[in-house]
Image: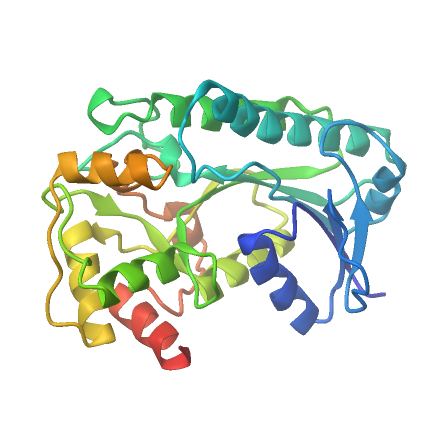
Amino acid sequence: MTPRIVLAGGNGFIGRLLVKSFVAGNYEVVILTRSPAPGETAIRQVRWDGRTLGDWAGELEGAHALINLAGRSVNCRYNARNRREILESRVQSTKVLGDAIALSRRPPQVWLNASTATIYKHTFDRQMDEATGEIGATPEAKDEFSIEVARAWEETLYKAPTPATRKVALRTAMVFAAGKGGVYRTLRGLTRWGLGGTIAGGRQFISWIHEADFCRSVEWLIHRDDFSGPVNVASPNPIPQREMMRIIRRECGVPFGLPATRGMLEVAAFVHRTEAELILKSRRVVPSRLLAEGFQFRFPRMEDAVREIEDRL
């Protein structure tokens, strides 16, 4: 029997990567979405609102895995309304999925819920893994709200009464992918315009993962019955921002990139209606649990990851 994967919020950038991977792997894929696409034949799309129980809950019956990616984009200004929507969209969707699983006669074997590598403390000199990483906000990084969201997101997952369903929190880093709408295409565009230089000194670490390794790690976690709790989904080699941009410039054939101060970044973030924290925070996150259990990364080094993506572009 073909294993069924239910993806809540599966029409977003990360969801599309997983859907493509699962379809190629001959899984049955069902997407829970607020806006089902008409005429879609390769996968089923089922309407839900991310807040209340409904007919969609029947899709969980007998499913092999549930993956929850639902949540408003953080690529915006953190005003009061956006903060509320970012937090509520994550907590409410996680809670209602837990309620649906609790009511299932044949609940999913595993529930992978999105989280974020941003949950760890801003740091330059210390690697953050699942066992020893410190969780907390840092005024320098302006990440208090992001930490609040991450904590509430994971607490809602763990509180859900689902004793027959294994639960994993995916503390995912930036996913580098060739498709439009992702962080790599943004960085590539800035680089090609000559703006791919050092930002605010460039010491801050960037945690990242190649799209192939992201999809492979998610599938690997689905089939590892001994894995539960938080898992860092990131390359084992986070690198400083200045080194990341040097690699992207080289692979794009751009000889220089204008640097930007912290103040310049703050102004640019305001103009583009986003937050400087997304670039200023130093995320030195490593996937200790994946490595300890033998997961093999195809693209552990950013040089190879960027080269592979550029070969396709």
- The residue lying toward the viewer, choosing from 240 and 271, is 271
Residue 58: x, y in percent? 88, 42
How many numbered marks appear?
0
> In this view of the protein, can residue 163 be seen by the observer?
no
Residue 198: x, y in percent? 13, 51
Residue at 75% x, 34% y: name it.
Answer: 49
In the image, is 87 to the left or to the right of 245?
right
Residue 39: x, y in percent? 81, 65
- The residue lying toward the viewer, choosing from 159 and 75, is 75
Toward the bottom, the furthest residue is: 311
- The residue lying toward the viewer, choosing from 275 and 247, is 275
Residue 139: x, y in percent? 23, 20
Residue at 41% x, 26% y: name it.
Answer: 78
Q: Is residue 245 above or below residue 140?
A: below
Res 105 quadrant in image:
top right
Looking at the image, what colour scheme do you see?
Answer: rainbow
> In this view of the protein, can residue 185 be seen by the observer?
yes
- The residue lying toward the viewer, choosing from 161 and 91, is 91
In the image, is 162 to the left or to the right of 250?
right
Toward the front, the furthest residue is: 271
In the image, is 272 to the left or to the right of 94?
left
Residue at 44% x, 38% y: name it.
Answer: 116
Q: Quadrant of the N terminus?
A: bottom right
Q: Quadrant of the C terminus?
A: bottom left
Residue at 65% x, 51% y: name it.
Answer: 10
